[in-house]
Image (cartoon, rainbow, N blue to C red):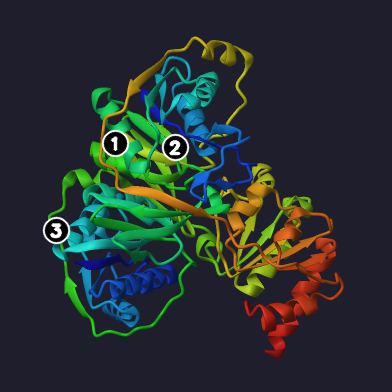
Amino acid sequence: MKVLVCISNVPDTTTKITFTDNNTQFNTNGVQFILNPYDEIALTRAIELTDGDKGTVTVINVGEANTEATIRKALAIGATDAVRINAKPHDAWFVAYQIAQYVKAHPFDLILTGRESIDYNGSKVAGMLGELLDLPSVSIIKKLEVDGDKATVEREIEGGKEILTVPFPFVAGTAEGVAEPKIPNMRGIMSARTKPLKIIEAIEVKTNSEIISYETPTPRGQVKLVAADDAAKLIELLHTEAKVI
Amino acid sequence: MSVLIYAENADGKFKKSTFEAVSYARAIADQNNTSLTAISIGDVSSDELNSLAKYGTEKILNVANAQLKNFVNQAYASVIAEAAKKQVADIVILSNSFSGRGLAPRLGVKLDAGVVDGAVSLPEQSGGKFTVKKTAFSGKAFAVVELTSANKVIALTPNSYKIVETAKPAQIEDFSIEAKVSDFKVLLKEIVRSTDKVSLPDAEIVVSGGRGLKGPENWGMIEELADLLGAATACSKPVSDAGWRPHSEHVGQTGIAVSPNLYIAIGISGAIQHLAGISSSKVIVVINKDAEAPFFKVADYGIVGDAFEVVPKLIAAIKEHKNVA
């Protein structure tokens, strides 16, 4: 089985988010970038599914040269090889379009993405790839098991889950539950340096969205503390002042 | 031009988030002096369909095809895209639900439309620009996105837009398209309903527990409190990582983001990743025995105290409050 895992390079989850240039640019100064945590889940499952000689895992990233540390991390975790499409990831459409062109020339049995990237919180690439490649797509899966020429997946829904069977090839966006990421071992880290990383140029395409500015949430006022033995007071405040119960 | 709203149902009933999305779509139609059509797919009664008119739809397309009774991502996207073309709708609205997140990107490609998912407020339209604010950095910020394409798809975050009643006389029309076999490759084997009474992403009140509760055996009081408030239960990442609670309850940057009216955090210190997932809650209550817990800095109300003493008192106080009310 040939698996493609689409990865993004995102600010570490502990990052304090700030902006520059009159709130039009994300301030990357001092920010540590990591492999998007949901993509790491996808990658871990892909490696489990192809363990031994059951297949290969290719990671693909649309990004500039600064994403290479993250790509090497994916190789250290256990991907077979990597592709970087050399361009700024303008928006989900741009990224999906580039990856779709690559997949048209190099078919895969299974294409995984994280459920969303933790920077722009889109969950669009999986669905767009499905549409561009005329493949089924399942967004936000919690479980993925292979059963011959098809897979059984659990899709999250409000108040429960759906159990679905999907024939290969297909696209899915993975969430927690699909796999438990592991820290790469020394052998993985050493071999990552020599694993193939192919760099290809992006194809020009018209984009249809643009981030024009950012805002940070309005800070809340000072917390109103209630004495520990006066729970009734809190209930009263929530009822009469905050009006939420 | 016109606006099309996909009115999502669960077991034949429209959810609150659907009415929010309809109200939102109505406001966008008004911004553009145009009409609003809703499309409903599945087995929905005409009474239920008519309820959409209360929020301002002028036409309701009803897709009652038995093959489409349950959600099939590709097939639903095809039907909605065809409806958009038939209605000459240049703006398609849906709820940013689990299913909506599957549909929006496919619709974007089918309609050659820019997509904003996770929208939190009405578009601004001035000087020929169409911009929408959406959540970014998992709740740590918002991004204002300009859609430059003629067609637009917007998926609205649940609990971020108020339901507005603007009754319009509406007509229900049956709608169907020739189904493409390749749209039905995904087969539904089973729907498993969780035993939770309130689903977390839709909940207006959330009661959330952290490591301070010491073990899964202590969740009884969290559940009782949630029950009394009609709330959903949630937890922090260490709790779901330890297997005390299911991953579906994990709220935070790598779990799910919620925006309830009231978020009650019990025994959660307030790591930046957790705060990201709850920052758009309208009112935040924190109960923690550590007065220095970072969570107090973003809370509206707080109690510094041991959860094992405070929560039973809260439960008693709510029972009392309910008796009086």
Q: Whole-percent x and y of residue A195?
A: 47, 12
Quadrant hosting residue B17: bottom left
Q: Quadrant of the N terminus of chain A?
A: top left
Which amino acid, mark 2? Leu
Using residue A55 as the reference point, say whether residue B316 is left or right of it: right
Q: Quadrant of the C terminus of chain A?
A: bottom right
Q: Which of marks 1 and 2 is nearer the N terminus?
A: 1
Residue assigned mark 1: A97
Residue assigned mark 3: B177
Give the distance between the C-alpha atoms of the residues marked 2 and 3, in whole angstroms: 32 Å
Q: Is mark 2 on a helix, strand or loop?
A: strand
User: Is there one chain holding both mark 1 and mark 2?
Assistant: yes
Q: Whole-percent x and y of residue A209?
A: 34, 49
Q: Is residue B170 visible?
A: yes
Labels 1, 3: front one = 1
Which amino acid, mark 3? Ile
